[in-house]
Amino acid sequence: MAELFIKQAKQYAVVRPTYPKQLFEFIASKTPFHHLVWDVGTGSGQAIPPLAKMYKNVIGTDTSQKQLEFAPKLPNVKYHHHTSPIMSIEELQQNVASQSTIDLVTIAQALHWFDHPQFFDQVKWALKKPNGIIAAWCYTTPEVNEDVDAVFGLFYKVDSGPYWEEARKRVDNKYKDISFPFEAIDGLDHTGPFEFKAEKVMNLEEYLMYIRSWSAYITAKEKGVELLTDEVVEKFKHAWNISGGESEKVMKFPIYLRIGKVGKLTIE
């Protein structure tokens, strides 16, 4: 997937939603210590600024050097580009942190692409025992209004449906079907998903740019298929205009968070 996103890195950075403050406040309230965060699959760093405000040090890693170029540069943040989908323990120790030293591992809109058993073993190796936290979240399709959403729903399921990879179903299912081998945090009776909401104001061109940043759109394009045909764009324009005269509208992205603590597990 990294190869696909390289082509749309700038669009991805511009049109993807900014995560709400409440999400990070919730996660930070469950983290006993706030020294070190590892943000995995950081991409263009949508999660980085709020993490950098709440934690002393943040390390963002990603397989896409192009996306990392658009990530925010902050004094307490460093980035590491790696080429393999999952880093080895040796690379993790050399470029991220030593065993049992990380307070929080975050994965924003990326967990569905990972080899979960291998990745979770690395998370268990890296997190402080027993209260190190893993927080992984995804956001589903944006909600605008009845008119725009009706056009979008058909486009998402029918037009772009054949071009989504299998992993996308995990997002559509709100990460419920991901086996999450972590313990419920004290005060919570399960590991989620917990629901939040992100908002982003867009005009129609930005809304269409958001669609063009999809992996499904890029895959279709590579196969010679233009999903946003003139006819489809006209349908979106009509829905956009009849639902109010304003040129900008608020997109609401439902967010679903899985969160848990590592417990006393150890990986040697």
Image: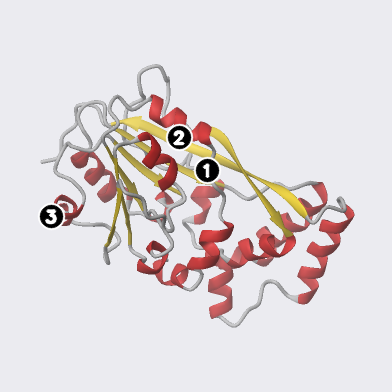
Pick out the residue farthest to the left.
268
Q: CA distance from mark 2 to mark 1?
A: 8 Å
Q: Give the image location of residue 14, x and y in percent.
A: 56, 60
Q: Nearer the viewer, mark 3 or mark 2?
A: 2
Which residue is under mark 1? 19
The amino acid type of the residue labelled 3 equals Glu
Q: Which mark is residue 90?
A: 3
Q: Is residue 122 left or right of residue 204?
A: left
Q: Give the image location of residue 246, x and y in percent.
A: 83, 52
Q: CA distance from mark 3 to mark 1?
A: 32 Å
Q: State the SS at label 3.
A: helix
The quarter of the displayed image where residue 224 is located: bottom right
The amino acid type of the residue labelled 2 equals Phe
Front residue of 241 and 136: 241
State yes or no: discs 3 and 1 in contact (Cβ < 8 Å). no
Q: State the SS at label 2.
A: helix
Q: Which mark is residue 24?
A: 2
The amino acid type of the residue labelled 1 equals Tyr
Q: Is residue 243 left or right of residue 133?
A: right
Q: Which mark is residue 83?
A: none
Q: State the SS at label 1.
A: loop
Mark 3 or mark 2: whose residue is earlier in sequence: 2
Q: Residue at x 26, y 34 (%)?
A: 35
Q: Give the image location of residue 195, x and y in percent.
A: 55, 33
Above or below: residue 167 compared with residue 163: above
